[in-house]
Amino acid sequence: MSVGKAVSWILLAACGPLIAWLPFPLIMKSLLAQATFSALFALGVGLLIKQNGMISFGHAAFFGLPGYLLGVLLPYQLVSAELLICAALLLSGGLAFVLGLVFVRAQGIAFGMLTLAIGQAVYEAATRIRWLSGGNDGLTLKLPAKIFGLSLKVLQQPSGMLAVSWLVMVATLAIVSLLASSRFGRLTEAIRDNEERARFLGYRTLWPRAAVFGLSAVVTGVGGVMFALYSGFISPDTVHWTASGSALIMAILGGSGTSWGPIAGALVYFFLKESLDSFTTHWLSIIGVALIVITVAFPTGLAGLVPFARQLIANRREARLARA
Amino acid sequence: MAIQLLNGLVYGALLFTVASGLALMFGLRRIVNFAHGSLYMLGAYVGYSVSHLFGFWIGLFAAGICLALAGILLDGAVFRPLQHRGPLTTLLVTFGLALITEDLVLSVWGKDTLSLPVPPAVGGDWWLLDTTFPVYRLLIIAFGAVASFSLLVWLKGSRAGLFVRAASYDPVTSAVQGVNTDRLGAVVVAVSAGLAGMSGVVAAPLLSLAPNMASDILVDSFIVVVVGGLGSVAGAFVAALLLGQINVLGVVFMPELTSLLPFLLMIAVLLLKPAGLAGDRV
């Protein structure tokens, strides 16, 4: 990694704690913290699109599942909360991996339907199995006073959570980007582009795709855990299919061709929604039109604007040089 | 028990009339219409408003016509221009359309649950197997039967049906042979949308009208289409009847797991027969 890249990663990581430390209004910090949860959610969805070329309509299942596992298992105090958080993420990722072994066999569209169905199944389970999940009321998380050495009071207040979740988000993004440029990342991209050819070259094509599905579930789950820690509460809203839909829109809006696109999409989506909600009730139409326009006219999303802008600047410079 | 089987048949009939359209569209254009549940919902709301003015039957008819016209528009404005852009593009665009439709329904009819009364002519109960059964539910079964029979006759008997089957099997070769796939597409989408709209009206007295009705029926129809085999109307028929029974029997015997059963069925079918029950057949 070049020095310039390392510096830009550090600057990016510093943004969150800086905003948390500066005297911005609390409501804005709270919003930004919630945007980072959605950003992690969208990062997972985007990872699946980028590496596998697969669209998930049910990722909310993996956003809410770790939180529900925490809500159900924390009262028993079997292991420490930190271990339980890791276990919940691994469990939900493992479940996704196993499901992925079945799901990725389904051709293109059928995959989307399967994910929609698992999302719906988890939602129904969350609302119907009352004795376990608390039904529509949800579950309150019985969290200890300190988690990973941080006081719960700090985590449940906007500035503290913003700093922590931003760092978690940047760290997760770094891991996802490293993974995408690794051998594994290139292999999955090859399978995405032509599965038959990859198999012909001697690669197994089933488990790498299932692994991407599992990983994307873990990334999404990290967002869900941050959300659950912040609110101390988990409810069926988090696993409803509209949550999956929003995350998908964020990923498409930001552009799924890059790892960071979905995060940018989530931040833009969140602030657009907040600022528009005050003077129009037609948010659904606005986001629907935006989705259509971006899908048809700008398939690379917001992330596609960066190379476009770079090209524009380069052209200008060339023109200036030519004049001189 | 027999009554439960009949109830399963009622839901199966509704599912088939919605899902058969999805299967037809997939067969012809290799697209998934995420807005199909929205067509069903729009039909129900249009039928609701019209039947308040002119009665149920005209409402049903009007919803079918309106939605068929909307289908022609949908095909011309969305499916045809995007047919070379890959299936994911259409999926996302129709997802956007579904969001817009939900907003439209919320703005015009509000977010409260509405109910459409059962038309008085078919309002009573019949004695059936030493218990009573609402006549209206029998009517829904009849509606499903008429719809599937007409589709069968149309697909197997008419020239257009022959073309639809040929184009589903291989769109490019059929086009080379002189089948006008664009006009065929408009017809198929119009028929599918009209059927979806009419089943929305038919379902309205039984289930109620609410802006979430689109996603509810969409998920079940997707399962039907995947289980039956993408693009297969016959497969959708079998799968819809199967899912109808599973839903009702699930509610009776294991209420907590009902929602998981269709999903388990879908996984089982995809494991054993990845192409669905019908495979390649139309």
Image (cartoon, helix red, strand yellow):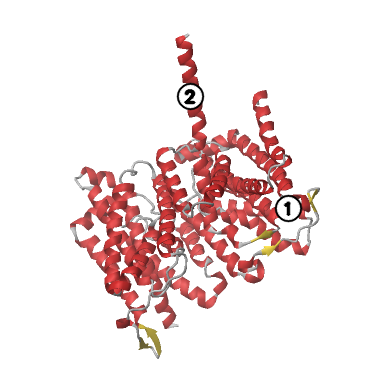
Image quadrant of residue B197?
bottom left
Circle on res. A156: 1
Q: Is residue B235 visible?
A: no
Crowding near pointer 1: few (<14 within 10 Å), some, many (20+)?
some
User: Residue A196 versus residue B140: which sits nearer the camera?
Assistant: B140
Instruction: Return the x and y of residue B102 as percentages of the image width and height.
Output: 43, 58
Identify the residue at image location x=76%, y=52%.
A82
User: Residue A218 versus residue B232: which sits nearer the camera?
Assistant: A218
Q: Which residue is mark 2?
A: A311
In the image, residue A194 above or below residue B66: above
Query: Label 1's element?
Result: loop
In the image, residue B79 above or below residue B119: above
Q: CA distance from mark 2 to mark 1?
A: 44 Å
Q: Is residue A60 visible?
A: yes
Mark 2 residue type? Gln
**Mark 1 or mark 2, which is nearer the start of the sequence?**
1
Q: Residue furthest front?
A: A279
Q: Give the chain letter at badge 1.
A: A
Identify the residue at image location x=66%, y=32%.
A9
Circle on res. B119: none
User: Residue A86 versus residue B218: which sits nearer the camera?
Assistant: B218
